[in-house]
Image: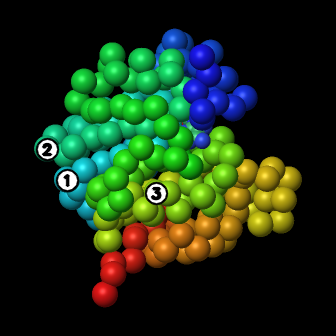
Amino acid sequence: MKSKHHTLDVELFERWGSTYERSWMQQHLFDPVHSAVLHQAASRFKPASVLDIGCGSGRLLRKVHDYWPEARLSGVDPAHKMLEVARQLTPEARFSMGSGEALPLEDASVDLAFSTISFHHWRDQAAGVREVARVLRPGGSFLLADFTLPTWLAWLLPRVHSAAQMRMLFEQAGLDVQAQPGPVARFVRITIGTKIADD
Ligand SMILES: C[S@@+](CC[C@H](N)C(=O)[O-])C[C@H]1O[C@@H](n2cnc3c(N)ncnc32)[C@H](O)[C@@H]1O
């Protein structure tokens, strides 16, 4: 039975799940992006809880465990096959079926959230960033790494944004943008936002 998160993009990852870890793209795209987000996070944060949204096979969370062995790790993904691989390879983390737009997590329950090369698959990206802001505790941060286009090209692909558009999505969700480092692997930029603490 198809999950309520099912889309054509998710179908692609249901098919790719069993070979995803062996893809040539790990070395050329995903691993360099993981290293870049972890480098950015390690110099800024010491989280007790970490969430990876669109976590795929759990590869980033395994590296997160090496950085912060004490942190509570969760991964969310809408593709059942990806979650199956993630659970086999990543016993350190808890995985749940879900999407960026509907995270199966409590309000203010996460210190640090990541999402790598997943955001362009989200159907309602503004709702997704608001949802991440909901689950972050005040002062918690979100590192989102995805393909980014220059402003003059960003109109071509509706779900790929310029750095300025990413900044706006974050700010509209109540996330204060700290930095937008990159590019990594030529086309990927990281947006780092922190949930504004209540007074
Ligand atoms: C290219 S993979 C990246 C996986 C992982 N983040 C990594 O860096 O290896 C994209 C992932 O996003 C997931 N995805 C697709 N639609 C999503 C959505 N609406 N919310 C969250 N994740 C989604 C896919 O199932 C897939 O596992």
Residue receiving disc 1: 48
Q: Residue at x 39, y 77 (%)?
A: 196
From this viewpoint, is residue 27 visible? no
Farthest top residue? 18
Q: CA distance from mark 2 to mark 3?
A: 22 Å
Q: CB under 8 Å between callouts 1 and 2?
A: yes
Q: Residue at x 46, y 57 (%)?
A: 132
Q: Residue furthest left?
A: 70
* Residue drawn at (33%, 78%) of the image: 197
What residue sits 63% from the left and 60% below the top? 126
Residue type for callout 2: Glu
First in sequence, mark 1 or 2: give its number. 1
Ligand 1 quarter of the rendering: top right
The amino acid sitting under disc 1 is Ala
Q: Which residue is mark 2?
A: 70
Location of mark 3 (residue): 132
- Dot 3 lies on which element? helix
